[in-house]
Image (cartoon, rainbow, N blue to C red):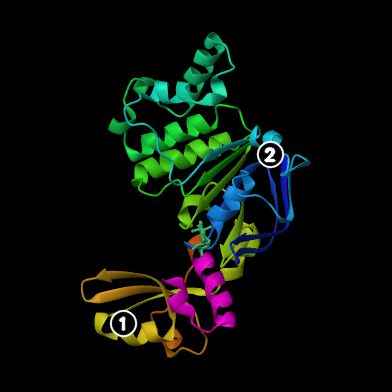
């Protein structure tokens, strides 16, 4: 299974929001990372045929995206603003969907049972949707999106509003599903995809600014990430010199994680340590490089 996107442009009215998108996505988990407004939802809506393709080409398994019906039968989609009737139980919500209307009732029951089991909701199948936690709702959403046994599962910002434990459970569920499907996961949080995805694309301002392995992205930031501990009172001048990734306050000290800059005097501080880059570091480093080259306003763009 392969999704190929070639020279895709997308517009809302006259405003262009996707610019010459080129991507090849194969079986496994694929992370789409970018800040709010980067164009992730627009790209996903295009892939699930909710937005027509007028400029460029997309194919899935060799089938053109213009063949809407064939493409839709291959796709399961969990949108960001996914909602269900609160008064239905988990089981009813599954049964309600049109996808199943042509399937005989025995097969239907079996399929619903299997999917609720897979997303760990079997024991909650008679719980009403409105009584479910955010994580349970998302998992039910995944079960629904898998009803037609799609080859591609597309999930938009799935971890928004989930607590850390639910987040982890959800991530594990998606990586299990990605063993034999393409799972495309969009997020603005790097850690959502760090453990699960091998390949990612980073979007910014409607452009793909990186598409390769996570490993490659991280290697680009190797040697550029540092920490230093300074008294709180010295924090401000450091912030002015370098781009801060994170800050930890410990008593009167501030522990600062930042992107190195050879011209900054803080680099000569005796307590400066070089750190191993994480995906989050590498992502911010990439944005700062692009931002720096494009308009010089680095931190304002990143920490917006
Ligand atoms: P993301 O999912 O990465 O947050 P979106 O695809 O939602 O990004 O948005 C990309 C850009 O398109 C943003 O500038 C957003 O304001 C704009 N946009 C999104 N939806 C619409 C719409 N229906 N009409 C006009 N502009 C839109």
- Find residue 13 and report its image quarter: bottom right
Q: Is residue 222 visible?
A: no
Which residue shows up at 75% across the image and 39% down it?
61
Q: Pointers 1 and 2 in contact (CB under 8 A)?
A: no
Q: Is residue 235 above or below residue 222?
A: below
87 with respect to 187 (left or right)? left
Quadrant including the N terminus = top right
Q: CA distance from mark 1 to mark 2?
A: 55 Å
The residue that label 1 is drawn on is: 235
Magenta-tinted stretch: 281-304
Asked which secondary structure carries label 1, the reply is helix
Which residue shows up at 37% across the image and 82% down it?
239
Which residue shows up at 49% across the image and 20% down it?
112
Residue 168 percent across, percent down from the top left:
42, 43
Which residue shows up at 57% across the image and 76% down it?
289
Question: Which residue is most to the top?
Answer: 106
- Find residue 247 and report its image quarter: bottom left
Mark carried by residue 68: 2
Q: Is residue 249 visible?
A: yes
Asked whether mark 2 lies closer than 8 Å to ligand 1, one says no
User: Magenta stretch containing residue 296, yes or no?
Assistant: yes
Q: Is residue 161 above or below residue 134?
A: below
């Amino acid at each position: 299974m392969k999704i190929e996107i070639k020279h895709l442009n997308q517009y809302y009215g006259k405003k262009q929001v996707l610019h010459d998108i080129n991507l090849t996505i194969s079986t496994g988990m694929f992370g789409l990372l970018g800040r709010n407004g980067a164009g992730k939802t627009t790209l996903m809506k295009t892939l699930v045929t909710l937005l027509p393709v007028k400029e460029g080409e997309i194919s899935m398994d060799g089938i053109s995206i213009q063949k809407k019906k064939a493409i839709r039968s291959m796709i399961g989609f969990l949108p960001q603003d996914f909602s269900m009737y609160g008064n239905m139980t988990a089981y009813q919500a599954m049964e309600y969907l049109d996808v199943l209307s042509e399937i005989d009732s025995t097969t239907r029951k079996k399929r619903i049972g299997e999917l609720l089991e897979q997303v760990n909701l079997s024991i909650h199948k008679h719980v009403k949707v409105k009584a479910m936690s955010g994580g349970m709702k998302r998992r039910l959403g995944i079960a629904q999106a898998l009803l037609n046994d799609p080859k591609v599962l597309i999930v938009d910002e799935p971890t928004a509003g989930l607590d850390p434990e639910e987040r982890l459970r959800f991530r594990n569920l998606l990586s299990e599903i990605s063993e034999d499907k393409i799972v495309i996961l969009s997020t603005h949080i790097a850690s959502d995809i760090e453990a699960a995805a091998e390949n990612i694309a980073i979007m910014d301002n409607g452009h793909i600014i990186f598409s390769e392995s996570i490993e490659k992205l991280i290697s680009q930031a190797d040697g550029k990430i540092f920490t230093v501990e300074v008294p709180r009172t010295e924090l401000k001048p450091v912030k002015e010199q370098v781009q801060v990734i994170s800050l930890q306050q410990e008593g009167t000290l501030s522990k600062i994680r930042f992107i190195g800059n050879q011209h900054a005097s803080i680099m000569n501080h005796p307590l400066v340590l070089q750190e191993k880059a994480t995906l989050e570091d590498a992502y911010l480093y990439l944005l700062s490089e692009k931002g720096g080259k494009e308009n010089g306003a680095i931190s304002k763009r990143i920490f917006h």
